[in-house]
Image: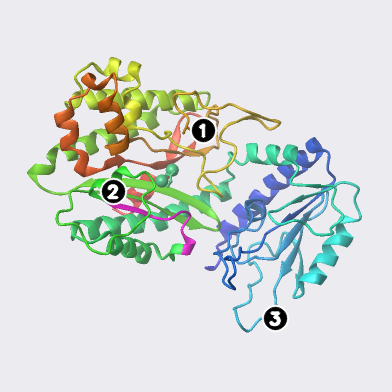
């Protein structure tokens, strides 16, 4: 991890102050007097001695924003400094984890090289309270804890995860800067005629990330592959003709994610129709972002996206009906089958998107939009994605063609675009008191 600036140290101190208040309120609310938060362990492949890449428990990562923390745990007791039991084995097979640089001045640190002793230390700390909650993936063994992953405590914490501290926004900007460097190189590699694999490798190199470090597997899709929403392969050879390129690729910094998608049309008059659709989607996406302010329902933005898609389909000659009819009949759901976006932070699809309050209570998306991951009222401090799409997905198009609404679509035009796969434009925005800051576009502009 690079050297820390004073700004980072100050931001982190402010973040811990907010986090302390949040956790004290959550523990009181859920009726606990302490919490043990375990970072976790990497998984093991079945019948193998190899492990999966490690991703720490996000509740731990919010306090200790480091990746190399397997086996460590945190004790949180209201009124006291959090205590970090840091696991640092004496190991010559692997590089042992380095003590966290950022946390030093703010957390009590107990370094342990023996998991059994670390467990004993936690056990004796837990025994000092009546009601200690344990938060972690693996079972706490014989720790004297009152409850494991209690729903009410998690619910309170998950609801508040939506509101980002200045430190978290700083980390998300840093993650975005990595991703944007990758996106620019990927765009160049596409224009140079690269294969999906070559574009992916160009992305990794320019964003200075290994594939394990990515927040999610890069989606690098040429032509029809853009119609597979989470396309996961990297063809080693370029297609005979590259017509279009959809790249959904992110960055990760101190555990915080950026989630960015761009779509490009190949140069040339024969691709103008698709290029015009990409431009229309880009413009629509930016107009949607202008509608965001505290108090607006995210669901309303999602519905608005469908109205805009209907207008684009109509304007570009893809319908035999009005835009209103396309919206009213739900035809747009064939072209945009996913949600407009999701909360983002320590997880790419961050928790709490369907929660109505800290107590829990879910607001499921309406039946016609089952994939929508965010139904909350928009509030200052939230960070979420805005990622409208317009795809030519064979499975969904064929069902529409075979159904009662088939005559509402201009099939000749739609079928001519199948070879382009689809379009998605995805930015990450921070809600302010009267609008948004677009973290993604700010970073792209900074690179110009
Ligand atoms: N990259 C996954 C998503 O956009 O949600
Ligand atoms: Mn996303
Ligand atoms: Mn994405």
In what element is the residue under mark 1?
loop
Marks 2 & 3, CB-CB < 8 Å contact: no
| Outermost residue toward the left in this view | 269
Residue shown at 63% from the left, 76% from the top? 96
Magenta region includes residue 215: yes
The residue that label 1 is drawn on is: 374
Q: Earlier in the sequence, mark 1 or mark 2?
A: 2
Left-right relation of 274 to 134 = left
Coordinates of residue 223 in the picture (x, y in percent): 23, 48
Give the number of the mark in front: 2 or 3: 2
* Mark 2 crowdedness (10 Å alpha carbons): few <14, some 14-19, many ≥20: many
Give the number of the mark in front: 1 or 2: 2
Coordinates of residue 424 in the picture (x, y in percent): 32, 41
In what element is the residue under mark 3?
loop
* Mark 3 crowdedness (10 Å alpha carbons): few <14, some 14-19, many ≥20: few
Q: Earlier in the sequence, mark 3 or mark 1?
A: 3
Q: Is residue 64 above or below residue 317?
A: below
Residue shown at 90% from the left, 50% from the top? 129
Magenta region includes residue 143: no
- Looking at the rendered image, the quarter that the N terminus falls into is bottom right
The residue that label 3 is drawn on is: 90
Coordinates of residue 14 in the picture (x, y in percent): 65, 49
Q: Nearer the viewer, residue 205 or 181?
A: 205
User: Which portion, as a residue range, is magenta?
Assistant: 212-221
Ligand 2 shows up in the quarter that is top left
The residue that label 2 is drawn on is: 225
């Amino acid at each position: 991890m690079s050297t820390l600036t004073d700004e980072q140290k100050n931001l982190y101190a402010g973040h811990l102050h907010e986090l302390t208040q949040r956790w004290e309120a959550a523990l009181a609310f859920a009726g606990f007097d302490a919490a043990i938060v375990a970072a976790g362990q990497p998984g093991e492949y079945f019948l193998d001695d190899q492990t999966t890449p490690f991703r720490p428990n996000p509740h731990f990562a919010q306090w200790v924003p480091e990746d190399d923390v397997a086996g460590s745990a945190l004790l949180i007791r209201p009124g006291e400094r959090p205590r970090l039991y840091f696991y640092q084995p004496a190991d010559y097979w692997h590089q042992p984890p380095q003590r966290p640089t950022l946390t030093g001045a703010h957390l009590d640190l107990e370094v342990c090289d023996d998991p059994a002793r670390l467990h004993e230390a936690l056990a004796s700390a837990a025994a000092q309270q009546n009601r200690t909650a344990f938060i972690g993936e693996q079972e706490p063994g014989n720790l004297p804890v009152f409850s494991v992953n209690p729903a009410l405590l998690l619910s309170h914490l998950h609801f508040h995860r939506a509101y980002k501290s200045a430190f978290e926004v700083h980390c998300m900007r840093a993650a975005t800067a990595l991703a944007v460097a990758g996106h620019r190189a990927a765009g160049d590699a596409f224009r140079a005629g690269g294969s999906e694999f070559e574009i992916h490798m160009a992305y990794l190199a320019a964003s200075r990330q290994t594939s394990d470090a990515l927040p999610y597997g890069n989606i690098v899709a040429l032509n029809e592959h853009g119609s597979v929403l989470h396309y996961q392969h990297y063809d080693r050879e370029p297609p005979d003709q590259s017509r279009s390129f959809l790249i959904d690729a992110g960055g990760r910094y101190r555990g915080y994610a950026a989630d960015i998608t761009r779509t490009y049309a190949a140069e040339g008059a024969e691709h103008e129709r698709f290029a015009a659709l990409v431009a229309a989607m880009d413009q629509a996406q930016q107009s949607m972002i202008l509608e965001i302010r505290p108090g607006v329902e995210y669901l309303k933005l999602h519905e608005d996206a469908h109205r805009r898609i209907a207008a684009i389909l109509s304007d570009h000659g893809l319908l035999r009906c009005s835009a209103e009819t396309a919206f009213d009949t739900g035809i747009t759901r064939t072209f945009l089958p996913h949600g407009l976006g999701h909360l983002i932070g320590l997880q790419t699809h961050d928790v709490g998107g369907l929660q109505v309050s800290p107590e829990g209570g879910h607001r499921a998306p309406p039946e016609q939009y089952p994939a929508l991951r965010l139904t909350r009222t928009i509030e200052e401090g939230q960070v979420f994605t805005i990622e409208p799409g317009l795809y030519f997905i064979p499975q969904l198009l064929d069902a529409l063609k075979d159904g009662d609404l088939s005559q509402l679509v201009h099939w000749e035009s739609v079928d001519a675009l199948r070879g382009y796969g689809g379009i998605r434009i995805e930015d990450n925005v921070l809600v302010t008191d009267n609008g948004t800051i677009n973290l993604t576009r700010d970073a792209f502009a900074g690179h110009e």
